[in-house]
Image (cartoon, grey):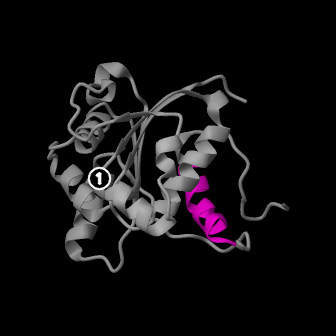
Amino acid sequence: MTNTKHKIIVAVTGASGSIYAKVLFEKLQKLSNQIEEIGVVMSDNAKFVWETELGNTDYNKLPYTFYEKQDFMAPFASGSANFKTMIVCPCSMGTLGRISSGISNDLTTRAADVILKERRKLILVARETPLSLIHINNMKTITESGGIICPATPSFYSNPTSFEDLASTVVDRVLTLSGFEHNSFSWGEKQ
């Protein structure tokens, strides 16, 4: 096991798929020994979608520091704060498009801009279907800029039996991409 402690930003947008954010937060809490700091940005639409899809406001119970969407004094609005990873989960196509275009009109897009300019790890859990050519071109631009597009596309290899299990197939990939050491299903390994 590594002694690296992660400083990460988690942004939650108003895209459908709040269960991905819920499962991500639950798994991050279990990995707290690998975490130095987590800063969270959650849009008003994200809170509305969470309440609509999950039927609760449990995001209020999370043990992380939440920043307002226009708080440009948040530490991760600058590269000097040395946050190494940003996860946008789920990521709306509007947010993805603004990041792709370099439009830093809120804390989420500013933080993503900082992560890209500092050549750090940006992971966008894109949640949309079908995709237009505009979406695909925006994803291409972000990929060429060093970002990672990790679509919220669950796998079925592990025989998931609940919505949380399905969401975990995506979240586990995100955690692996982020550099966390954790137990998850791996193709070809006996469970």
For label 1, count other residues whose C-alpha is less than 10 Å away and answer few (under 14), some (14-19) or many (20+): some
Taking depth in this image into account, of 148 and 171 the one nearest to the observer is 171
Quadrant position of residue 29? top right
Outermost residue toward the bottom in this view: 130
Which quadrant would the N terminus be assigned to in this image?
A: top right
Can you give x and y, in whole percent of width and height, for residue 137 in the image? Answer: 23, 66
Secondary structure under the numbered disc 1 in the rendered image: helix
Please say if 65 is above or below 18: above
Q: Residue at x 53, y 34 (%)?
A: 63
Can you give x and y, in whole percent of width and height, for residue 135 in the image? Answer: 25, 68
Taking depth in this image into account, of 31 and 5 the one nearest to the observer is 31
Taking depth in this image into account, of 75 and 78 the one nearest to the observer is 75
On the picture, is 170 further left or further right than 117?
right
- Residue bounds of the magenta highlight: 162-176
Which quadrant would the C terminus be assigned to in this image?
A: bottom right
Q: Secondary structure of the magenta portion, mostly?
A: helix
Can you give x and y, in whole percent of width and height, for residue 115 in the image? Answer: 32, 36
Q: Amino acid at mark 1?
A: Asp
- The question of residue 168 being in magenta is answered with yes
On the picture, is 19 further left or further right than 50?
right
Q: Which residue is mark 1?
A: 44
